[in-house]
Image: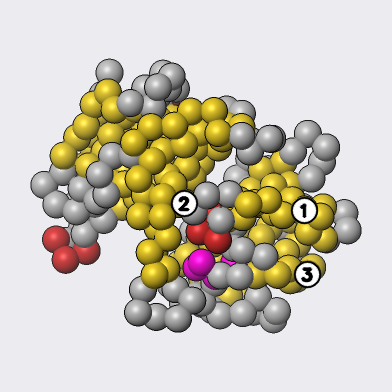
Amino acid sequence: MRLAGDLRDVVFDAETDGTAWALATFGLCRIDVGSLTKIGDDIRQGIGKYQWRMLAVSDDVLCISAYQGRSMVLVSRRDGTVIKRLRMGAPELVHRLGDGRHRCWSFHHAVATDLDLRSGRCVARHRTPYGKGLVVVGDQVVALCGEREDTPFPNVWNIDATHVIAFDADTRTPVRRAEAPEHSIEVLGADAASRIVIAARHTISVLSPVTLEVEGTYDHHADLGGTLLVPEDNLVVVRDPVHLADRYSVVRWQ
């Protein structure tokens, strides 16, 4: 059974029942992880077309948003029904705060929004720098930050990442800052020694967990088509661009 368009994102529930939610271009569906088959029909009503990112907000709720969008849909993780649509910058990262709220980071829109799931309301909005490619590392959010660059298209812009900054996840206070590797695209996470791993246009860089200074760099033979960090093994799987065929490289460090 085919998905409703190209696969966009997946949230796994394999720890509990061996299934996962799959977001496609034109809908949402449940899949069996073992057999890689679709369970039931596609869910389309209220979700909309051309969504891009799906995150698990909690054990009961998913959030779905368009690429660099200005709204987010809350969806039941139990049956896929739409709970509510919220006007806010599409989040790149969501994590739970100590008081039960959930903080939705949207560095592309330079805002972090605190969400109360019980009421389904945005209860606070906080300004942040413009940025991209962020991840949670321990009790900090690490992001690539820089200047907003306008494009010829209305209400569309890019982010020129000039610095890598670690923020306290609760207070949003910057605690560490350093220059970002050239043409940085995404913070992949932290390796087994808590070093920060960053993917750039054609390089993988490993940064000191204390100073965020570059400790080592791998220079790929072409632009990176995709990357996947395996943190416990100090390993990144690199995919070449599509026009260079389906070739993969494995990058490891001590």
Q: Which mark is residue 131?
A: 2
Q: Point out the tag, 2 or 1, that comes first from the N-terminus.
A: 1
Magenta part of the protein: which range? Answer: 64-68
- Residue 145 part of the magenta segment: no
Classify 15 as above or below 156. Answer: above
Q: Nearer the viewer, residue 148 or 7?
A: 148
On the question of residue 173 being in view, the answer is: yes
Residue type pointed to by label 2: Gly
For discs 1 and 3, the disc positioned in front in the rendered view: 1
On the question of residue 30 being in view, the answer is: no
Whole-percent x and y of residue 234? Answer: 34, 26
Q: Residue at x 72, y 41 (%)?
A: 96
Per the image, the residue denoted by label 1 is 124
Left or right: 188 with respect to 247? right
Residue type pointed to by label 1: Ala
Classify 67 as above or below 36. Answer: below
Per the image, the residue denoted by label 3 is 84
Classify 51 as above or below 55. Answer: below
**For the residue carrying disc 1, how many other residues have a C-alpha within 10 Å: few (<14), some (14-19), or many (20+)?**
few
Left or right: 102 with respect to 147? right
